[in-house]
């Protein structure tokens, strides 16, 4: 039951911009799952869901993929240490880094597994980060800024 519910939660947050636990509970009930607020809260914690900004200015739940233990912290440090600026150019983000850090920062961005990001190409101090949809570019830019400001 729990595995099926977790799979459905991931499916729902990938299909819809779900911002609150109440919205998630509503969608789950529509799919035939009987859930309480406590169950939703526990599922969010167990699935390690996080909230990301979307282009409408709202937030939504998303799954942050993680590698081996401690990898997220390493990638966050690389982003924070190497990042300088980000600018939008259509569906591309142009990210400037400390000289020699672009490849490491691009690898860190790719490791975040944000669904909006198609991939990154890095030079010495510049990264082109392709975003699937033009309207997602500002939200990804805001996510990057939020990560590096922690």
Image (spheres, helix red, strand yellow):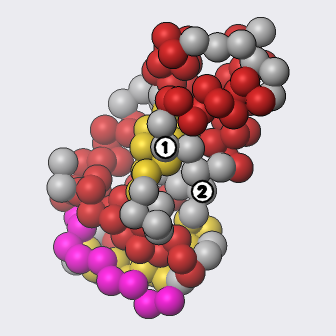
- Residue 23 lies, in percent from the top left, at 57, 36
Front-lying residue, 75 or 41: 41
Residue at 28 percent of width and 53 percent of height: 147
Q: Which residue lies furthest to the bottom in this view?
A: 89
Viewer-proximal residue, 124 or 71?
71
Q: Would you call the spot at circle 2 few (<14 residues within 10 Å), some (14-19), or many (20 or more)?
A: some
Q: Do the residues labelled 1 and 2 touch (CB within 8 Å)?
A: no
Instruction: Identify whether 88 is placed above or below 61.
Output: below
Q: Which mark is residue 57?
A: none
Q: Nearer the viewer, residue 133 or 108?
A: 133
**Residue with the mark numbered 2:** 115
> What residue is drawn where x is 70% and y is 49%?
15
The residue to which callout 1 is attached is 19
Mark 1–mark 2 distance (CA, rounded to whole Å): 16 Å
Residue 67 visible in the picture: no
Regarding residue 34, the answer to whether it shows in the image is: yes
Residue 24 sits inside the magenta stretch: no
**Picture coordinates of residue 106, whole percent (x, y):** 42, 65
Q: Where is residue 145 in the image (x, y as percent from the top left)?
A: 27, 63
Q: Residues within 10 Å of mark 1 (few under 14, many from 20)?
A: some
Q: What element carries label 2?
A: loop
Residue 2 higher or lower than 62, as above or below: above
Within the image, what quadrant is residue 130 found in? Answer: bottom right
Magenta region: which residues? 82-90
Report the predominant secondary structure element of the magenta stretch: strand
């Amino acid at each position: 039951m729990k595995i099926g519910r977790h799979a459905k939660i991931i499916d729902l947050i990938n299909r819809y911009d779900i911002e609150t636990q109440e919205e998630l509970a509503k969608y789950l009930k529509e799919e035939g799952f009987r859930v309480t607020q406590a169950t939703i809260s526990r599922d969010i914690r167990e699935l390690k869901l996080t909230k990301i900004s979307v282009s409408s200015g709202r937030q939504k739940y998303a799954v942050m993929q993680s590698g081996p233990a401690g990898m997220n912290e390493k990638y966050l440090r690389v982003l924070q240490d190497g990042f300088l600026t980000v600018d939008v150019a259509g569906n591309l983000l142009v990210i400037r880094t400390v000289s020699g850090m672009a490849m490491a920062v691009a690898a860190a961005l790719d490791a975040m597994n944000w669904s909006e990001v198609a991939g990154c190409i890095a030079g010495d101090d510049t990264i082109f980060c392709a975003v699937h949809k033009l309207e997602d570019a500002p939200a990804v830019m805001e996510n990057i800024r939020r990560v590096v400001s922690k």
